[in-house]
Image (spheres, coloured by chain):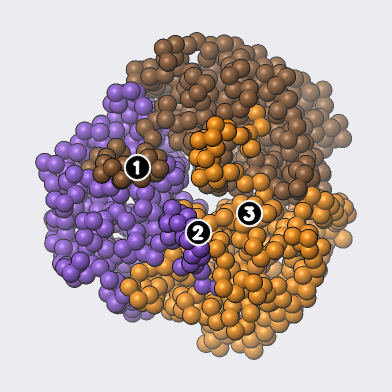
Chain colours: A purple, B brown, C orange
Amino acid sequence: MPSYATNMRLKLPILALTLEAVTIVLYALLVVYDTGDAHGHDGSHANPNTTHSSSPMTLYPMFQDVHVMIFIGFGFLMTFLKKYGFSSVGINLLLAAFGLQWGLLLQNIWHMHDGKIKVSIDRMINADFSTATVLISFGAVLGKTSPVQLLIMTLLEITVFCINEHLVVEILEVSDVGASMTIHAFGAYFGLAVARVLYRPGLQDGHENDKSVYHSDLFAMIGTVYLWMFWPSFNSAIAEAGDAQLRAVINTYFSLAACTLAAFATSSLVEKKGKLDMVHIQNATLAGGVAVGTCADMNIQPFGAMLIGITAGVISTVGFKFLTPILASKLRIQDTCGVHNLHGMPGILGGLAGILAAALGKKDGVSPAYQACGLASSLGFALVGGLITGLIMKIPFLGQPPDENCFEDSIFWEVPEEEEEHEEHLTHGDYSTNKTEA
Amino acid sequence: MPSYATNMRLKLPILALTLEAVTIVLYALLVVYDTGDAHGHDGSHANPNTTHSSSPMTLYPMFQDVHVMIFIGFGFLMTFLKKYGFSSVGINLLLAAFGLQWGLLLQNIWHMHDGKIKVSIDRMINADFSTATVLISFGAVLGKTSPVQLLIMTLLEITVFCINEHLVVEILEVSDVGASMTIHAFGAYFGLAVARVLYRPGLQDGHENDKSVYHSDLFAMIGTVYLWMFWPSFNSAIAEAGDAQLRAVINTYFSLAACTLAAFATSSLVEKKGKLDMVHIQNATLAGGVAVGTCADMNIQPFGAMLIGITAGVISTVGFKFLTPILASKLRIQDTCGVHNLHGMPGILGGLAGILAAALGKKDGVSPAYQACGLASSLGFALVGGLITGLIMKIPFLGQPPDENCFEDSIFWEVPEEEEEHEEHLTHGDYSTNKTEA
Amino acid sequence: MPSYATNMRLKLPILALTLEAVTIVLYALLVVYDTGDAHGHDGSHANPNTTHSSSPMTLYPMFQDVHVMIFIGFGFLMTFLKKYGFSSVGINLLLAAFGLQWGLLLQNIWHMHDGKIKVSIDRMINADFSTATVLISFGAVLGKTSPVQLLIMTLLEITVFCINEHLVVEILEVSDVGASMTIHAFGAYFGLAVARVLYRPGLQDGHENDKSVYHSDLFAMIGTVYLWMFWPSFNSAIAEAGDAQLRAVINTYFSLAACTLAAFATSSLVEKKGKLDMVHIQNATLAGGVAVGTCADMNIQPFGAMLIGITAGVISTVGFKFLTPILASKLRIQDTCGVHNLHGMPGILGGLAGILAAALGKKDGVSPAYQACGLASSLGFALVGGLITGLIMKIPFLGQPPDENCFEDSIFWEVPEEEEEHEEHLTHGDYSTNKTEA
């Protein structure tokens, strides 16, 4: 493959170590612990918990729940492909590990104290959040990109995310506690824009490896169930302590429960023999967590959350069945994981629900017009940012794999010999030990 | 298969959406957040933490541990069957998602405030608990039932559970903090009664798919280890805050540790070559958590908890080896997961240990006679409720699978083509992509 | 195999039940709950949180994080071998379940109150910690030892660990909050010393089963990611409440993030085609957590933690690539999991970083000389203890498996028939059900 520059031996180390070196220099200049007398006069808008907490560790269990969602949840959710599990969970770890360092810097550059960024648990939660946008976009281009392309996407997407988040949450004071708009819709449409630029005509008839096997679907369910369980923490982690945080937990709990019944019902309904489709169960059961995000801390009551959840579950499943193929064939957007159905449409639904809830006065001081601006801004930054990022990622030097090596770890990973090959080796008396170093 | 109505295309959507619609109407009428002035004068008997907690979120980490046990623990524990992993973890999610909504309604209908049920974290913990009964019973009938049958079982079992729990815990004031009697023994004997009614003579010589493969046993160990780790949270989550809660954690920790050594020892002892059996390790190591449940908050001291644990580990392993085959052949109870050994006998052991501990004065205000009534009531409601539920589930319209399709996902799920088939397709140049939608 | 005594039928039950019986007697005599008036005048040096906590449950979420690292993290990390998953996660459970009971006794025998050991959450965290040493050593001898050998190693290693920990932490007052020296370096060199004594010339050319398959590498990533996520809890769990604990969390978070980029970069760099090696990603990404352990609660600032992390990531990956083969061929130390690279060298790095930080005054009252003594003592006790333990484990009666049965569960476990055999059985109409008991 002469025109593909997929050997990462120099590119990946140089890029990763350069990014890390720049980060360390910036941290040495700017980042300190939020300890001692820093407490009590933190005027930041986005972290009301800091001032209310009796202990700097109050939010730590919430942080760990979000941490599990980022690294286990997103990582394993993407292991559904038969030959792409190493990349899914491994590259997920790489991107999030860099992203959290970069996100923490850019999210807090706007409001430093004495020229310093002060790290606390709620800043770490927000840093983890910023990586979620990248991991969503990763789903849209899964199997079709190199680690170097993806590190560059991480750098650029988190930068754009931080600008949009600052505009929406801090300047416009839009309410988006569970980030339906600023993370889910943003991450999905950013990723879809990238996927549009990276469109591969060669994959329009599918690819042998773009599907699951039985056990890869079970690995993916580890991701699904962890995201499902801890989504109440995602939507409530940065809510105001007390009743608002409790509401965010309760609303998310019930939205997801209702969404799950809707996803199972719809999955069975859209298939001729009434069989359930694992793709729907892995993804659409989670749409209720996305869609209730903006409203999570509002006074919408449990039944309101359930209505949002049931709507999200139906929309998401229908999207997987009917919309994803159309996106690929008509709009030339090949969305590997269907992030449009899990994060895109439910994210917009969440934004719209927030506008409606604001209009109905479900949270003091929230205006429907500003909420609508927040949604529009998130979509606009996502599409423009994603298109530009996609153009940069398209540079051949960055190592995009050829069509025939898509959805396969072995182009970027040393992979254990296949069991069937192995059997042959046994037959021929060849006990090669390509993974053993001892 | 003319007499089997296993196409779920209309039945499952109609049932699931009807149940959800009824639930939403009832929630709109009855369920609100437990926020604001609701705190401080909650007279409910079952949630002492609400009144003591300084924050509505105090129990949230405990809730999340219990949540993981319900969705990952039970879900993956049942993935041990070679071809039934989708159903195990997927249907587990469906049943628990409906069950928690239904359980929260029925558990709190007895003591509403101003005509409203007020949702708090401890009510959510109890709602999760109520689903555990169903997931235990699911284990007894695993592989032999349709999703529609199981949703109906969920509806009925949680209803019966809530009646028995109200009688035992609130009216008789029986002490059962870890629910050895009201959840574990109840869920097991309910499920065994259902399995008795659904007895299948055609499976008396076993079934090709009623066994594990290597990786399915490893998936099941994910469930085992999560249940093992978080059982201290299960047994202490609704204990009185302070010393009683600490005792519940410590007793469960040591009971499980001792039980684990007993389970490994017994597993090795009962096999001719002294080899360990994965079924025992997956299940019997957990029996100590079940058996210490009733006594968990009592002053039995760590060594007392260890004695309970070691007894449970031995009984459970011996049950798997010798009793389960007898139950199937003599009593016509085919117990797929061996819930009798993990939840049934250890649950009764827990009840008996509670009677003994009460007689020895290990908890103030607890009477051995009432404890015995609690055990008898739980067993009685379970057996009668299970028999009636089993008769309802037997209606052919509900989609029970034929014998030859038992223990196999493919009757209710779209399943990826097998790897060996796949290889054939490759040979014949057929690159069908039955899972791909992009 | 006449000279191998691998039938565990009597040995394992007798050993396990004897150990448990002795433990229960000692607990009946010595161990009580830390409840009631015990609070408030606990003079113990190692658990400062007890006196500061408002509730006995304050550290419970931290405990559960550590618990997950011990049972899921270590257990699944070792499932990477193709045919050794049952032993990895199962024997891990057995050893840790016994180890925590034994560790709690020996760690607290030095400072009893009124002749009693009082169990609290922080004592349980320390008990879990003590098992980590054994699980690290288990990694060095993985696949080459019997359960009986390993239970004896657990008994002896935890005994030696408790002596060294008492000397280093309580008498010399060395600062080692994340236990780089007393757990990681100790566990690694203890295990390497055992592996040296148990050296098998027959394995010097590798072994057919001493490698991974695709899905076993994915199971191992479950362990990796859980260890990665919860390492901040490991390093901060017993830190002084407040700012020191927050620093320990933040330093570990950033050290791991930087280490991850270094591990990916180095893995790609050392392979000719620039491909990533799963062994490096599974292990070297965690070295930053080990190496920052001693300094975790010190005032080294985030960028200091990142420098430690990046160094650890490079050293660990280079170790896997170049040092492990040399250890095996020149020093006759066959280190199955490469614990020298994950715990050994990073543990020493952590100790050295602690000496440097002490010299730079990053924590009050900490002396470089005493820190150096702590490192020397940990290495000395590990090597001498490991050599003696290895000699005891070498007694043939204890059931060491023959070379040809190494790295294979089936010598100590009943293992499901292979799928390929199964296919043959199908062809021949043989529906044997060796795992089914119903």
**Residue type at tag 3:** Asp
Residue bearing mark 3: C409
**Residue type at tag 1:** Glu
**Residue type at tag 2:** Leu
Which numbered dot is residue A80? Answer: none
Residue bearing mark 2: A426
Q: Quadrant of the C terminus of chain A?
A: bottom right
At which x and y percent is residue B179? 67, 32
Quarter of the image for residue C68 reads bottom right
- SS at badge 2: helix
Q: Chain of mark 2?
A: A
Between residue A228 and residue C263, name the one nearer to us. C263
Instruction: Using the image, determine if residue A45 lies above or below residue C314.
Output: above
Quarter of the image for residue C390 reads bottom right
Quarter of the image for residue A360 reads top left
Q: Which residue is located at x 61 percent, y 51 percent?
A: C86
